[in-house]
Image (cartoon, grey):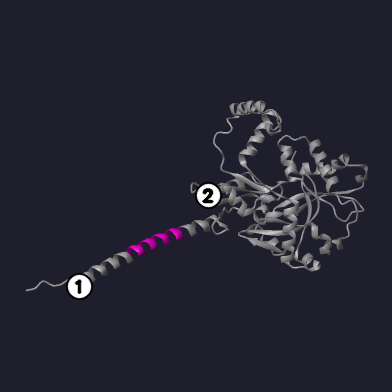
Amino acid sequence: MTYQEFKAHIAEQIKDYLPPTYQDADVSVARVKKNNNQELDGLNIQLAEENICPVIYLNHYYEDYQNGRAMGNILEEIAGCRESYGVKEHFPLEKLFDFEGNQERIIFQVVGRASNEEQLSKIPHRIEQDMALIYKILLNRGEEGMATITIDYTLLERMGVDEQTLYQTAMENTVREFPMTFFAMDDVIRETLEQDLFGFSLDTLQDEEMKNFLKEVLQEQTGFPKEPSPFYILTNEQKLDGAGVLFYPGVQELVAEKMKGDYFVLPSSIHETLIVPDNGMMDFEALRTMVNEVNQSAVHPAEVLTGQVYSYDRERGCLMTAEERFSQKQQEKTGEKKGILEKLHEKKNAVQKTDLGSQKLKPEPAL
């Protein structure tokens, strides 16, 4: 089945998986411009009494279908999403202009700066390196995603607030609604292997003897762990749009404490960042190459954050690009060498002056 046939099939069959109230709904598929100027195919299932409805993107479902997922299972999930995120009433659009009414629902998300220049010109935002914080109104949320509306300059003006107020409000709400989580990548790999091998996580076992036995089985069957991974994952508990956790108050300092020093930040996607201790063994250019290779091969284009690698300087308490930090270190080394040479030169001059002074004071032999 081609992608065009897949979209048509979804639109024709979706009502069979929805309650009777949806039988007269208007079903359509439209192209929608998303993050990084990517265009996705959005399924709209709109009831007559609704003036706003969730958009369900079909692109990744087709990938699932190509990988062997049953069509019926896909349709069931799409129907469940429509039920979960639907407003199911006429939404008064004037509510969007009420800042106080939406104050508890304003959140922020991090996107790439260079890849979203056109979008950023139309919406309030805050620049962080080559990333940007944008603001949204959270209408609904569930296990599979969120229903949001991006705040543009027109909406901001109608709200009657400035970007600083928007930023403070969004930061407070996002920290509360999407708490930070930080864990070793080895933990993710281990849990995945445990699920594949045993069907459950060994952390759920109370019997320590059995747990240790199964750990040995895991090691024998998979070879895990061979060597500890230096990578850690920073995201939110929902693991959705979690790259913004990096900018939560105090998080950069907290990570530095856990890393016991400086560290690199690798933007894995808009959903998470990877943290690597800067122990002098890592080459930032190799890390940047890795990030860009992963972006091209394993991350959906609409979910790519940036191809940069960042460095956190614990002593200065600041985040910068790894390239900038490398240049800074080189200048510091040059300055240190220059300082040492200057001191040696000063010492040499002092010795020479002392010798000359001694020669002048030395009595001449009598004739």
Q: Residue at x 84, y 46 (%)?
A: 84
According to the image, label 2 marks what residue? 278
Q: Quadrant of the C terminus?
A: bottom left
Q: Main secondary structure of the magenta part?
A: helix
Mark 2 surroundings within 10 Å by alpha-carbon count, few (fewer than 14), some (14 through 19), many (20 or more): many
Mark 1 surroundings within 10 Å by alpha-carbon count, few (fewer than 14), some (14 through 19), many (20 or more): few
Residue 358 visible in the snapshot: yes
According to the image, label 1 marks what residue? 361
Determine which quarter of the picture holds residue 189. top right
User: SS class of the residue under badge 1?
Assistant: helix
Q: Residue at x 61, y 59 (%)?
A: 130
Task: Report if residue 262 lies within the magenta region.
Answer: no
User: SS class of the residue under badge 2?
Assistant: loop
The percent position of residue 252, horizontal first and vertical second, equals 62, 54
Kind of residue sitting beneath label 1: Leu
N-terminal of the pair, mark 2 or mark 1, is: 2
